Amino acid sequence: MKHIKLTLRAYLVTGILIWLPLAVTLWVLDMIVGTLDQTLLLLPDAWRPYSLFGFDIPGLGVVLSVLVLLGTGMVAANVLGQRLFDYWDALMSRIPVVKSIYSSVKQVSDTLFSDTGQSFKKPLLVQFPHQGLWTVAFQTGSLPDSVNQSLADLGDEYIGVYVPTIPNPTSGYFVMVAKKETRELGMTVDEALKYAISMGMVAPGAPQPAGKKRQAPGANPTSTL
């Protein structure tokens, strides 16, 4: 009886391991598509799919969002469009409260997505939150001269790094550490980010043995026919 319970438990765990990644992937995609579908609410009632065809079209909001982004980029690529967006930036910069949020987000997005932006330079290992504990971090842009002058009396070269929180890497800590107290990782930024988000369970560059197959629960690896 005990052997049967262990076998059933092994089958259950195997089933979870197979279906969980797929279920989470579908859930995330459904959430993204559902969120973007809300952009259809910006259309007049007469233009919405339900009014035109009598039923909703899932995913149409994704297409609409992509078209809006492409159209915005095409307009901003010419001189007239650039002037319009400069006027828009100037207008947003005059609105109290809104200007502080808008300008901060714009600066971050311009830095991250611009081809000439500094974004994340490279992944590092730093001691955080105190000496003796190491975590994955990412070197950001150069420190401003005012900060470098304030740290000059310490005698070391300091760099700015971003330490992401796990499992949500969009929040984290910006700290300034001595460059000599960091260790470079032999990974790309994407590999290091994936390694951190997975809490160390997805190691980049780990080779899979050739021909290795998923073993059925309860099977004896040493048994032969």
Image: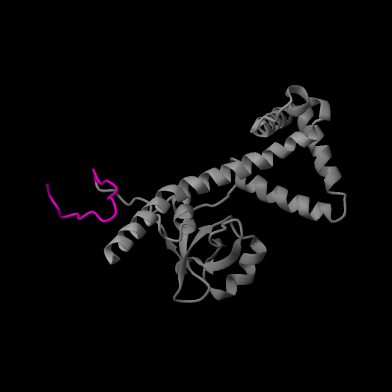
Please tell me which residue lies in front, 42 or 1. 1
Position of 105 with respect to 191 (left or right) is right
- Residue 44 placement: quadrant: top right
- Percent position of residue 157, x then y: 52, 66
Taking the view exactly as shown, the residue that stands out farthest to the left is 225
Position of 37 with respect to 133 (left or right) is right
Q: Residue at x 56, y 75 (%)?
A: 154
| Magenta-colored stretch includes residue 224 | yes
Q: Residue at x 49, y 57 (%)?
A: 197
How many numbered markers are drawn?
A: 0
- Residue 149 placement: quadrant: bottom right
Taking the view exactly as shown, the residue that stands out farthest to the front is 1
- Percent position of residue 36, x then y: 68, 39
Above/below status of 101 relative to 47: below
- Residue 48 placement: quadrant: top right
| Magenta-colored stretch includes residue 220 | yes
Please tell me which residue lies in front, 70 or 5. 5
Q: Which residues are magenta?
A: 210-225
Position of 84 with respect to 143 (left or right) is right
